[in-house]
Amino acid sequence: MEVQIKINGQNANVEVSVEVGEYLDRADHKTENLSHEQRRHWDGREFDEYIIAHECSRSYYETPEDWLCRKETIWEITTTLESCTAKQRYRFLLFALEGLSCSQIGNICGCSKSAIMRSIEAVRKKVKCALQPE
C-alpha cells in the first residue's frame, strides 16, 4: 500500500504494509476528531446541556440583567479583539467563526500552521483574561 507523507515540508510517496496504512488512516481520523473537538471548545467551556439549553437559543425569557450582562460580555470581547493585531484578529475569526482548520488558515494567509496556532492561542488567552472576574 502506498501512502503520502510529508518530510521536511516535501510530500513523499512511501510503500507500507496494509497494517501500517490502516494505522495511519486511524491516526488521521483521530487527529481530525480531536481538532473538531478542540474547535468546539475553543473558549475552554464544557459543552453540556446547560449551554445548549440556555445559550444556544434565545427562546427563554431574557431579563434586563441578563441582557445587560450579555451586552457587556460582547463589548469586552470586541474590545479585546480590537487590542489584538490585525493578523491575530483575522486568523482567530476565521478559526472561531468560520470553523476553518489551522492548516486551511495557513494556506489562506501563506504562513505555517504553527504561526496560526500561536496567533489563535494568543487571542484566546486575551479573551479568557478579559472575561475572568476581577
Image (cartoon, helix red, strand yellow):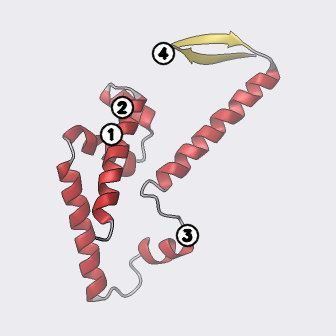
Please rate how many residues cluster around mark 4, counting C-alpha atoms within 10 Å: few if below 14, some from 14 to 19, many from 20.
Answer: few
| Residue 125 placement, left or right of 12 | left
Q: Secondary structure at mark 3?
A: loop
Q: Are marks 1 and 3 in contact (CB under 8 Å)?
A: no
Please rate how many residues cluster around mark 3, counting C-alpha atoms within 10 Å: few if below 14, some from 14 to 19, many from 20.
Answer: few
Q: CA distance from mark 1 to mark 3?
A: 27 Å
Q: Are marks 1 and 2 in contact (CB under 8 Å)?
A: yes
Query: Depth-wise, is mark 2 or mark 3 nearer the camera?
Result: 2
Give the residue type at disc 2. Answer: Ala
Identify residue for label 2: 115
Q: CA distance from mark 1 to mark 2?
A: 6 Å
Q: CA distance from mark 2 to mark 3?
A: 31 Å
Please rate how many residues cluster around mark 2, counting C-alpha atoms within 10 Å: few if below 14, some from 14 to 19, many from 20.
Answer: some
Q: Position of residue 107 (x, y in %)?
A: 38, 28
Identify residue for label 3: 48
Q: Earlier in the sequence, mark 2 or mark 3?
A: 3
Give the residue type at disc 1. Answer: Ser
What residue is rendered at 81% in x and 21% in y?
A: 18
Identify residue for label 4: 9
Identify residue for label 1: 119
Q: Position of residue 101 (x, y in %)?
A: 45, 39
Q: Secondary structure at mark 1?
A: helix
What residue is rendered at 32% in x and 71% in y?
A: 133
